[in-house]
Image (cartoon, grey):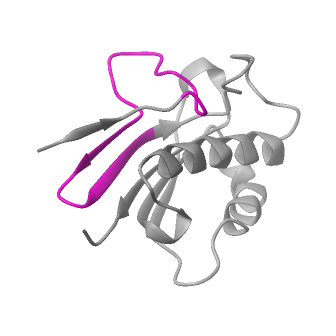
Amino acid sequence: MKKIIKTYHAPKPIGPYSQAVFINGVLYVSGQIAIDPESGQIVDKSIEEETRQVMKNIKAVLAEAGMTFNHIVKTSIFLSDMDYFGQVNETYGKYFEKDFPARETVAVKTLPKNVNVEISVIAVINE
């Protein structure tokens, strides 16, 4: 049976989707952008700050499901410009200790609210 994961420590969905769905030991986290859940404002002082906010939002959703970054097996990173790859990669990498998840990174024409980075993850826990 699927369980909808919802936390006030991550931004509310801006469309008809859930923050995450948990089913059969797998957590599917919707793409997160750099919205500060308290203010509702975009954090975009720099690409590094934007990425940190995205990762904080992911961390909050994982925590609500009883998981950590160590449970992530797959990430998808969407960038507004591939020139941000190095900075996003460096910031993102600080959230993982070892055994990095599988990943793809792609540049897209436009992201929601004109942000520069969006990240979705899949995490697995042994029940």
- Residue shown at the point (72%, 41%) measured from the top left: 53
Q: Main secondary structure of the magenta part?
A: loop
> Is residue 92 found left or right of 2 in the rendered image?
right
Between residue 64 and residue 123, name the one nearer to us.
Answer: 64
Q: Is residue 21 magenta?
A: yes
Where does the magenta region start and end? 8-30
Asked whether residue 102 is in view, the answer is: no
Q: Is residue 66 above or below residue 18?
A: below
- Residue shown at the point (64%, 79%) measured from the top left: 97
> Is residue 113 found left or right of 122 in the rendered image?
right
- Residue shown at the point (66%, 25%) measured from the top left: 37
Between residue 50 and residue 71, name the one nearer to us.
Answer: 71
> Is residue 122 found left or right of 34 in the rendered image?
left
Q: Is residue 40 magenta?
A: no
Q: Quadrant of residue 50?
A: top right
Q: Quadrant of residue 126?
A: bottom left
Residue 21: where, in percent of width, then height?
29, 41
Between residue 85 and residue 14, name the one nearer to us.
Answer: 14
